[in-house]
Amino acid sequence: MLLRKLSSNLNLEGISHVIVDEVHERNIQIDFLLILLRKLIENNKHIKIILMSATFNTCTFSQYFNNCPTVRVPGNVFPVKDYFLEDLQNFIPGINNLNRNDSVLDSDLVVKVINHINATQEPGAILCFLPGWNDIRTVHGKLLESNPNSSKLMICPAHSRLPHSEQRIIFEKPPEGVRKVILSTNIAETSITVDDVVYVVDSGLHKSTSFDGEKGIASLATEWITKANVRQRRGRAGRVKSGICYHLYKLGEFHNMAEYPIPELLRVPLENVILKCKLYCSNEKAEDVLSCALQPPTTSAIQNGVNELQELGILNEEENLTDLGKIVVNFGTHPRLSVALIYAAFLGCLNPVLNISAALTFGREPFINTLKDPGVIKEMKQAHDNLLYSDHLALSKIIDTWIELKEKSDASDYAANNLLDENNLTFIRDLKGLFSEDLYSAGILDKQEAYSDPLHKCNANSSHIRSILAALSAAFFPNVMKVSQGEVTHGKLKKDALTYSLLKGQRGYIQKESVVSNEYEFPSPWLIYFSALKSDARRLMMTSTVSSVPGLCLLLFNRQKLIYSMVI
């Protein structure tokens, strides 16, 4: 909201105070906002800026704002006792290996510590921090195996992609004589507060993204947390009584941890934030604006983002907004999806591309158990795919069907039968309205509600599959991979092996929830995708939402020659 306000009132005339809370999170929005606020106080001497957080480096932020004063407000919490790995060896049997030099979770150690707490400590919930969903599933299974009377444990997973109904369970009080055990990712560090947590088990690990500006590759890996993360996790105990934090790493390893996490501005592709630079500081180069950040990104990362926007036709060679860019800069989604919407409006297939863009902007599929059984999700999408081998088209069909039924007030059965989360679908539907408003404000639509009218010219080709794929191809290129069958490994031919070769030169992997996963017959071997993330574990570029598109479609809508090189 504040960024939107600044776009029309850059000096915030008429506003006396701006309060920014949780600044320690250092996401892109916060860091970019800080750039604008520092510029703001040079032009508006009367405004007051207040930055707040329970755990952040006050010196760094104070220096950034011309050595501004700091205020410390003491909190009222109960004491928390810390045990590190060398301490645990003294009173928990079976803990022998103290040499942990890699960032790999020891699930057996986690289970031993949780079982020890359950057997020896007073009542109180246990909150265990784990890197990811597979780790949660592994620890969950081992806890059940090691506890014959598992009814005495109330095991609750906590993950951002779980449905709200399952996430709410962690706040429920367990029955008398039952211990609540919450197995969580770092979502519980700041986003969730569970009042009855007394014991914290800190694995010292989390999933983290990084971005290689030279190669333009975003990666996901399990890494050690920082001291700031440790303080946040430790602080989850001691809310209602004295607590204990069990750190599954040595005290020396804690001292070797970085002080604070790497800000998001240094860990992700920068196309979005560069476009924001052009909205708020249109006459400045992106590098000049971002060099004013609290921790500026590298020149190569910025240039990679500029190149992406130039390939999309949003920036010209002088890094100024093109006619297309002057429209896209005001849209509320990723520039690639903004381009897809504009193409769709002119190709007459707006509604399905709005569905797809809203779902991709939301960042998760609208199913309630994507994490638990990806194969089931694939089956649900296949039922809506009509053998087109397109996750995008399947999602669009699902969203359309739900919206149509919702208007008749009988969507609940459809949602239940297809494992859909109606909260997610409601959010996606609302995003469609926002993006339609962007198109209307840009003069592309003659009325904001046009997208929902099947007879409007913007939807004249909404049932024409190739028009939809053309709009997506124009926006997603060069995010293309080719699927081929057969692979030579260690001198042996594996005839049934599937190989996904990215146009950008890497090997790919299609996740199990995709309609294309482990399939051999396609309308076309060319697949387009919105984004992919390198898995350090698999050493492959992963994506879960793809569409098979005709090669001719890519040739006509890629704005350049199609060049394909096989990865050896």
Image (spheres, rainbow, N blue to C red):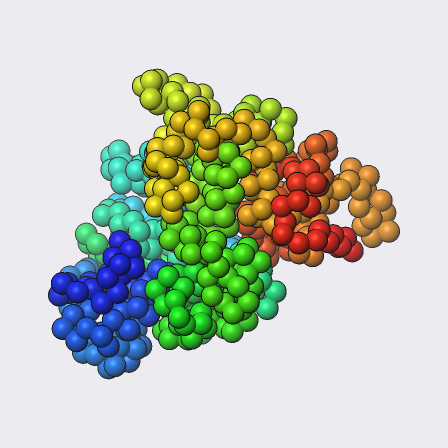
Q: Position of residue 36 (x, y in %)?
A: 30, 68
Along the horizontal axis of the image, is 58 left or right of 246?
A: left
**Vertical side of 275 occupied by 188: above or below:** above
Front-most of 247 and 424?
424
Along the horizontal axis of the image, is 30 left or right of 386?
A: left
User: Which residue occupies 33% across, 70% down?
Assistant: 35
Front-most of 224 and 16?
16
Along the horizontal axis of the image, is 529 left or right of 1?
A: right
On the rendered image, what quadrant is the C terminus found in?
bottom right
Count of residue discs: 0
**Vertical side of 416 occupied by 364: above or below:** below
User: Does the image show residue 231?
Assistant: no
User: Which residue occupies 54% across, 56% down?
Assistant: 313
Along the horizontal axis of the image, is 170 left or right of 309?
A: left
Front-most of 281 and 410?
281
Front-most of 384 and 242?
384
**Vertical side of 403 occupied by 57: above or below:** below
User: Which residue occupies 71% across, 41% down?
Assistant: 551
Q: Position of residue 466 (x, y in %)?
A: 61, 33
Q: Position of residue 227 (x, y in %)?
A: 37, 68
Q: Position of residue 106 (x, y in %)?
A: 52, 54
Place residue 472 in its image quadrant: top right
User: Which residue occupies 59% across, 37% down?
Assistant: 469
User: Does the image show residue 388?
Assistant: yes
